[in-house]
Amino acid sequence: MVSFGWSDAWLNVIAGAGDVRATGPVGSLLGGCAYYAATVELRQLRYFVTVAEELNFGRAAERLRIAGPSLSQQIKALERDLKVTLFDRDRRSVALTQAGSSLLPEARALVAQADELRRRAQGLAMSEPVRIGYVNWCPTDWAERAAGVAQVRVDTWVMPSHTQAARVSEGSLDLAICWVQGADLDSLSLQARLIGVDRLYALSAGTDESPVTARDTTVLIDTDAASWSSWNRYGEQFAAAFGAPVMRTDDGGVTGPTFFEHVRRLGRPVLNNPKGQDAPLPAGLVRRPVVAPTPLWTWSLVWRRGESSPAVLAVVDEFTRGTGDLVLGAPDTWVPDDDPHHPGHCRGG
């Protein structure tokens, strides 16, 4: 039993209601002996732990996916219920008080205990974590989104999309975030749900940041199919659809410093590979929106067809909850015809 700072507190974790009721003497925590009773919601404890880890309400709100003012109100309500000040805060800084520091380890333990209880109650406890791989893009809040559902182990081998999809099919991964097409799902016996979308742009030398049409955007294709199979397929389909010029290279120059040199040498806009979507640009290069239409690169969460693990399926549901179509249905946008999330023939699981 987690004492949460009260020497004789009784804790009742109610998984369905999602709250923790703590009743007992204040004890040494507040330096008094008066009787104290309070109802503390589990989510408030999770909010407290997250703010304590970030020491920044804005970042904590992003992690928790709630509005900043709402987070601040919940922390104030928790402080009011506990009759202690957890944080010293002003416009520029946030710091734990002595009481906040004393409570933090117990609050962490209580949140972890409640998450484990929920896993067990749902029959999702497992000795092995759910193994997940990715290529480039992945959610920044893995742990928070999986909390209470399953343990997740992020694979350290960052590999190309087609390789990660194959690893899921063969069983060395349970899930992967990668780019796939319908033919891949069929050949590898996988299912997919949309989890992210990158709006691709063109990279150009100079200072002109005006939009460029799809047909005026050059596509770089690499002869190394083992590394760039997915990008090559996407680029070739994009070029064929809009008559965009294609340049083939054998130096891995579809991303990174060598790609930047190709852009300078070509002197015309070049479609950016999603692996470099957020990479800092060197001097003399600019990003230009691609229009008529705008190419979209989809990230799928893939898993094996016939998957029977409740934990794997629960992680799929949690990671894709509320995703929607992520602008795939917006006018003047493009994905390949065989994309499993194509608005005209969605094949997601």
Image (spheres, rainbow, N blue to C red):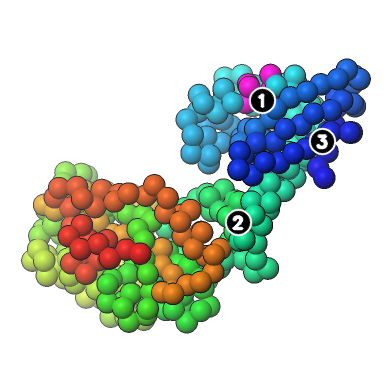
Query: The residue tagged with tag 1: helix, strand or loop?
Result: helix
Q: Give the range drawn in magenta.
A: 75-80
- Which amino acid, mark 1? Leu
Q: Earlier in the sequence, mark 3 or mark 1?
A: 3
Mark 2: which secondary structure?
Answer: loop
Mark whose residue sits in front, 3 or 1: 3
Q: In which quarter of the image is the N terminus?
A: top right
For label 2, the residue is 122
In the rendered structure, find residue 167 and report the number of the disc placed on it. Answer: none
Q: Find numbered disc 3 in the image and state the secondary structure of the residue it sits on.
A: strand
Q: Is residue 106 visible?
A: yes
Type of amino acid at the residue the image marks with label 3 = Trp
- Is residue 79 located in the magenta-colored stretch of the structure? yes
Instruction: List the residue tagged with mark 3.
Output: 10
> Marks 2 and 1, Cα distance to the nearest angstrom?
28 Å
> Could you tell whether 215 is left or right of 187 in the image?
left
Q: How far apart are marks 2 and 3 (CA)?
A: 24 Å
| Mark 3 vs 1: CB contact within 8 A | no
Instruction: Report the amino acid beneath label 2.
Output: Gln
Q: Earlier in the sequence, mark 2 or mark 1?
A: 1
Q: Where residue 268 appears, x then y in whole percent?
A: 16, 58
Q: What residue is drawn where x is 14% and y is 67%? A: 239
Q: Residues within 10 Å of mark 1 (few under 14, many from 20)?
A: many
Q: Residue 188: x and y, percent? A: 37, 80
Q: Which of marks 2 and 3 is nearer the N terminus?
A: 3
For label 1, the residue is 78
- Residue 332 higher or lower than 133, as above or below: above
Left or right: residue 167 versus residue 195 is: right
Quadrant of res 91 = top right
Q: In whole angstroms, how far apart are the C-alphas of marks 3 and 1?
A: 18 Å
The location of residue 172, given as percent across then percent down, is 53, 78
Residue at the image position 65 percent from the left and 62 percent from the top: 125
